[in-house]
Amino acid sequence: MPVVTYICHDGAINEIEVASGTSVMQGAVDNMIDGIVAECGGSCSCATCHCYIDEAWLDKVPPASEMEKDMLECVLEPEDNSRLSCQITVTDELDGLVVKLPASQF
Amino acid sequence: MTEPCCIVVGASHAGGQLAVSLRQQGWQGRILVIGDEPYLPYNRPPLSKTFLSGEKHIEDLLIRPQAQYEKVGIDFLLGQAVTAIDRNKKTVTLSKGETFAYDKLALTTGARVRPLHIAGSELKGVLYLRDISDAEHIRQFIGKGKKAVIVGGGYIGLETAAMLRKIGLQVTILEAAERILNRVTAPEVSDFYARVHQEEGVQLQTNVKIQGFSGQNRVEGVQCADGSVYAADLVIIGIGVIPNTELAQAAGLEVDNGIKVNDFCQTSDPDVTAAGDCTNHFNGFYQRNLRLESVQNAMEQAKVAAAALCGKPIQYNALPWFWSDQYDIKLQIAGLSSGYDELIIRGDHNSSRKFSAFYLSKGRVIAVDAINSPQDFMFGKQIITGKLLVDKAGLSDPKISLKDFLNK
């Protein structure tokens, strides 16, 4: 099963097995990782699942839709590697993916 | 010495979050969540969208899988209804008589559909949509070319209509008021949704008074007071919900259009909290009591309630927000618009599917309906909570970024 590494803002490192077909957001929620709130349950409506994709993986994740890009401009502290984790589905190719979580989703 | 036990009554959005938050906030004792549905906490919004179409299955709806609850020691008793609470003995009783003792109690009993009791409402095929079993029941009646009549032009009715239309049914929406979304949006937004549904081939009738449902073994038609009859293979009624407050009321807790809670989600009993659709609470921004029907309120109140139960109270002070997905339209709503005295439209609501409606009261924005305009929603939230002054010309001009208002 692919492993996704979630690095919390305080530095805590969580290496989590996330089944292919599950979103990066769901992997965090399932494992009660603080730092991802996911208010809308993955429907690209709330921008509380914001994460930063590690540079090494940036061009390996599928590109963001226009809706996601619009939402991303409005998150707290957006960066070039910002993504909404509910829009990234884990696949075997993303085994080893590393994401950093922001200090806050609000 | 037995460990303390917190019982959570209700296993949906609020209950599931409350249990998890209890652990996250340091509750060491037992956590027992009792729910009357046979499922672990699941996402309700997809029921009127991707679950109805079959795109999602039950396993996809679960908010967290069983293994995760087991990992942190959260126990569930599912498919069981709590029928009574004894606050003196500090016990809850289930329908078969079993009792459980609690040290702390959380009520997350949610709401149930408002029923329509008229002639023929017991006929097969006259259905509601609130939970998984409702949605599965509806799926049995779905088929291309079948006729669906939706009673009620609120969000549930409209979302269901959109999904059934996408599947290929003939869809008619019957609304009692003079426009759909009558109580929650401005006429301009109602008109927009009416236009979109009609463009998608849905028949929409307003000012309708329904007298009964006709049919032999199952529903075949909807009869109206003006004599019109709408043929139907399936009727879905969506006319609102009623908060489940009976348990709280019988237990002597204060109830008034919901279980009354303070800013810390505590009821009139210090050992009992409540969260979600079942509560009535005071909102500081709107300076009035609210009963909200939203996932956001359920989740955030659940966290506040858990904090109170762990002796670390935090004040609940959040701007309500909602979303609705119909066809290719994402609607995001920030705030509550009732009582507005001015409406500013940003974009083209007459012939496009992208615009926003800003609701103002005494010159300040109190709510925004953003249609396929996520930035208007996100920045709108900040404008609302910051009570920021806005230049009305700028607000109505999509070429001027809302970010400019935030910097002033």
Image (cartoon, helix red, strand yellow):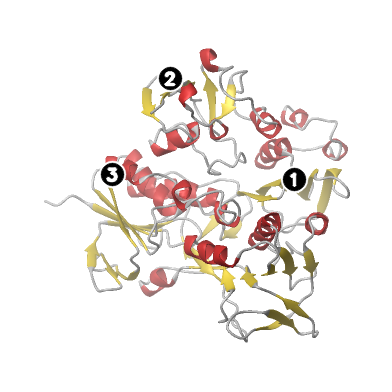
Q: CA distance from mark 3 to mark 2?
A: 26 Å
Q: Residues within 10 Å of mark 1 (few under 14, many from 20)?
A: many
Identified at 23% across, 68% down, the residue is B99
Q: CA distance from mark 1 to mark 3?
A: 41 Å
Identified at 80% across, 45% down, the residue is B353
State the image coordinates of residue B236 (x, y, percent, origin top left). 62, 69
Q: What is the residue that sits farthest to the top in this orientation? A: A56
Work out whether B112 lies above or below B215: above
Disc 3 residue type (three-letter): Glu
Chain for numbered disc 3: B
Q: Is residue A72 visible?
A: yes
Please give the label number shown on residue B371.
1
State the image coordinates of residue B29 (x, y, percent, origin top left). 23, 47
Disc 1 residue type (three-letter): Ile
State the image coordinates of residue B242 (x, y, percent, origin top left). 54, 69
Instruction: Give B285 or A64, whichever is nearer the viewer.
Output: A64
Residue tagged 2 = A96
Instruction: Give B270 or B307, whichever is nearer the viewer.
Output: B307
Indicate which disc, 1 or 3, sits on the residue closer to the N terminus: 3
Identified at 59% across, 42% down, the residue is A43
Label 1 close to label 3 by CB (< 8 Å): no
Residue tagged 3 = B70
Label 3 close to label 2 by CB (< 8 Å): no
Chain for numbered disc 2: A
